[in-house]
Image (cartoon, rainbow, N blue to C red):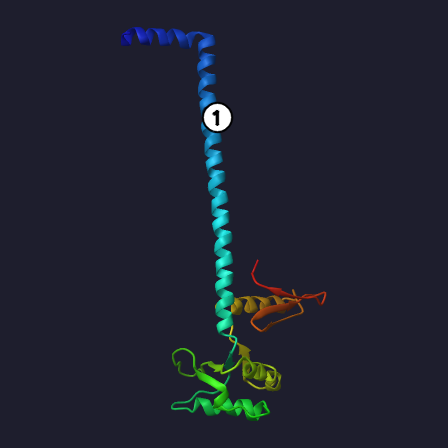
């Protein structure tokens, strides 16, 4: 078939109402089939993405739990004045034994290590992280931290970045009257709602 004859036949086909309808229906059928195929493919990919996002959240939560466990013997102390060539150990022990009246007295035998956090900043007192030799010694200090109320010294659990952020958000929510109270206990972030119900939060949403 020559090109000219093909052109003539095609023109005749398209000018025939039945031919035009058949061609239109054929094209529409192919397009619908392609669209459905694309929808199926997109749905499959969306499901895969949802699965991966869920898996990622699970892994992040597990990693956060493991990291928090490594911090369970530690506390962070804010408000202890900083000076050049200071005796950090003496300042911390003085806080525990004199200001908090720990009994029996805390000694360096019960402390694994302690140090200031971050680089020195003129005019500011860096936090001190204290890691105890045992979980019991850590809880002993945390259970007496209320004795520091009214002072400029605050002792808190050593939380992961994620949990510290959760507690910060909860405190902001408390200021707005959204909840009655919030605190951390054994690495868990707890809130008391306006119905006095206590529950743990793990996410911001």
Q: Is residue 160 shown to the viewer in this render?
A: no
Residue at the image position 51 percent from the left and 70 percent from the top: 68
Instruction: Decide if residue 8 is on the left or right side of residue 112.
Output: left
Q: Residues within 10 Å of mark 1 (few under 14, many from 20)?
A: few
Q: Report the front residue among 153 and 47.
A: 47
Tell me the element at label 1.
helix
Note whether 111 is above or below 35 in the view shown.
Answer: below
Q: Position of residue 181 (x, y in %)?
A: 65, 71
- Residue found at x 48% / y 60%: 60
Query: For residue 192, which quarter of the picture?
Result: bottom right
Question: Looking at the image, which residue is at 43% across and 91% down?
Answer: 87
Out of 173 and 189, give the one closest to the viewer: 189
Residue 154 falls in image quadrant: bottom right
Image side of residue 126 versus residue 106, left or right: left
Is 160 rendered above or below residue 147?
Answer: above
| Residue 141 image offset from top left, x and y in percent | 57, 84
Q: Nearer the viewer, residue 33 or 124?
A: 33
Image coordinates of residue 3 in percent, x first then y, are: 28, 10
Q: List the single residue furthest toward the left.
A: 2
How many numbered discs sit on the rendered protein? 1
Quadrant showing the C terminus: bottom right
Q: Is residue 49 above or below residue 61?
A: above
Q: Which residue is mark 1?
A: 32
- Of 190 and 16, the residue lying toward us: 190
């Amino acid at each position: 078939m020559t090109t000219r004859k093909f052109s003539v036949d095609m023109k005749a086909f398209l000018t025939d109402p039945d031919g035009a309808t058949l061609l239109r229906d054929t094209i529409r059928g192919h397009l619908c089939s392609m669209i459905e195929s694309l929808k199926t493919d997109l749905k499959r990919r969306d499901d895969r993405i949802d699965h991966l996002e869920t898996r990622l959240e699970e892994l992040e939560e597990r990693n956060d739990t493991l990291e928090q466990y490594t911090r369970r013997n530690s506390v962070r102390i804010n408000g202890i004045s900083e000076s050049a060539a200071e005796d950090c150990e003496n300042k911390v022990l003085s806080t525990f034994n004199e200001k908090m009246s720990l009994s029996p007295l805390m000694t360096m035998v019960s402390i694994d290590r302690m140090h200031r956090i971050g680089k020195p900043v003129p005019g500011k007192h860096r936090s001190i992280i204290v890691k105890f030799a045992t979980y019991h010694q850590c809880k002993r200090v945390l259970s007496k931290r209320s004795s520091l109320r009214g002072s400029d010294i605050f002792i808190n659990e050593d939380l992961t970045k994620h949990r510290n952020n959760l507690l910060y958000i909860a405190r902001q929510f408390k200021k707005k009257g959204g909840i009655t109270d919030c605190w951390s206990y054994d690495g868990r972030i707890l809130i008391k709602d306006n119905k006095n119900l206590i529950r743990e939060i793990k996410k911001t949403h």
